[in-house]
């Protein structure tokens, strides 16, 4: 069901991501990486197997079929501060975060590289990029970059990107 505060499409996307990562997957088998971006940056890690995890108070737990019901899989944040709390502590151990509309991206979740054990905070915005004009696409890509999360909505939100670990991959 789609509603203003509970978007059925994003919930379905979370369910689909959970199904895809039920077993570890190579990122480039799941996501399409821009070839022009890859040529300027070392993205060799995209060929590694990643698993979906919950990060709660610096404890990392892999998600499996027996991890619990999908009804409790996502945290619906109503403010920027709640998004930051999910990133920093996630006391309730939600796998996904559904940020408020003013945030920009539609879905946040963590993946862990099986080889290096490093975490990747995945930030997803749902769009059919083939049908979007280039200027709009560039703007959309900025909205999934931390310094631009709220800027695109002309909101002043204090955010601090000091994570609980320094072992994050950067895309």
Image (tube, rainbow, N blue to C red):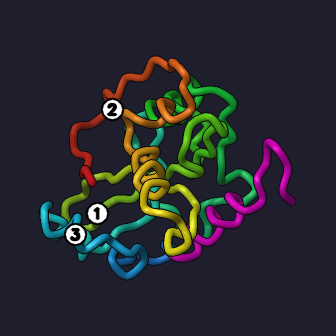
**Residue 11: quarter of image:** bottom right
Horizontally, residue 112 falls left or right of residue 11, namely left
**Going 45% across and 17% down the picture, which residue do you hit?**
158
Q: Which residues are magenta?
A: 1-20
What residue would you read off at disc 2?
163
Q: Say above or below: 24 vs 145.
A: below
Q: Say above or below: 50 vs 138.
A: below
Tell me how far mark 2 sits from mark 3, CA to CA.
29 Å
Q: Farthest residue to the bottom: give it.
A: 29
Tell me how far mark 2 sits from mark 1, CA to CA.
17 Å
The answer to whether the residue labelled 3 contacts the one labelled 1, judged by CB atoms less than 8 Å apart, is no
Check disc 2 and report its element: helix, strand or loop.
Answer: loop
Circle 3 packing at 10 Å, graded few (<14), some (14-19), many (20+), is few
- Residue 122 in view: no
Q: Nearer the viewer, residue 158 or 81?
A: 158
Q: Quadrant of the C terminus?
A: bottom left
Q: Nearer the viewer, mark 3 or mark 1?
A: 3
What residue would you read off at disc 1?
113
Q: Nearer the viewer, mark 2 or mark 3?
A: 3
What residue would you read off at disc 3?
36
Circle 1 packing at 10 Å, graded few (<14), some (14-19), many (20+), is many
State which tag comes first along the sequence, 2 or 3: 3
Q: How many labels were placed on the picture?
A: 3
Check disc 1 and report its element: helix, strand or loop.
Answer: strand
């Amino acid at each position: 069901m789609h509603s203003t505060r509970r978007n059925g499409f994003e919930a379905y996307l979370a369910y689909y991501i959970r199904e895809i990562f039920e077993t570890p997957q190579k990122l480039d088998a799941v996501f399409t990486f821009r070839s022009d971006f890859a040529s300027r940056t070392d993205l060799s890690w995209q060929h590694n197997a990643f698993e979906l995890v919950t990060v709660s108070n610096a404890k990392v737990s892999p998600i499996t079929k027996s991890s619990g019901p999908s009804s409790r899989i996502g945290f619906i944040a109503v403010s920027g501060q709640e998004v930051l709390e999910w990133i920093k502590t996630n006391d309730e151990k939600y796998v996904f975060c559904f940020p408020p509309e003013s945030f920009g991206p539609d879905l946040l979740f963590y993946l862990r590289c099986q080889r290096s054990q490093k975490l990747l905070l995945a930030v997803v915005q749902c769009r059919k990029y083939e049908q979007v004009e280039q200027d709009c696409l560039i703007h959309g890509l900025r909205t999934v970059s931390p310094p631009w999360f709220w800027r695109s909505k002309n909101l002043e939100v204090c955010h601090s990107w000091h994570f609980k670990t320094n072992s994050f991959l950067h895309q």
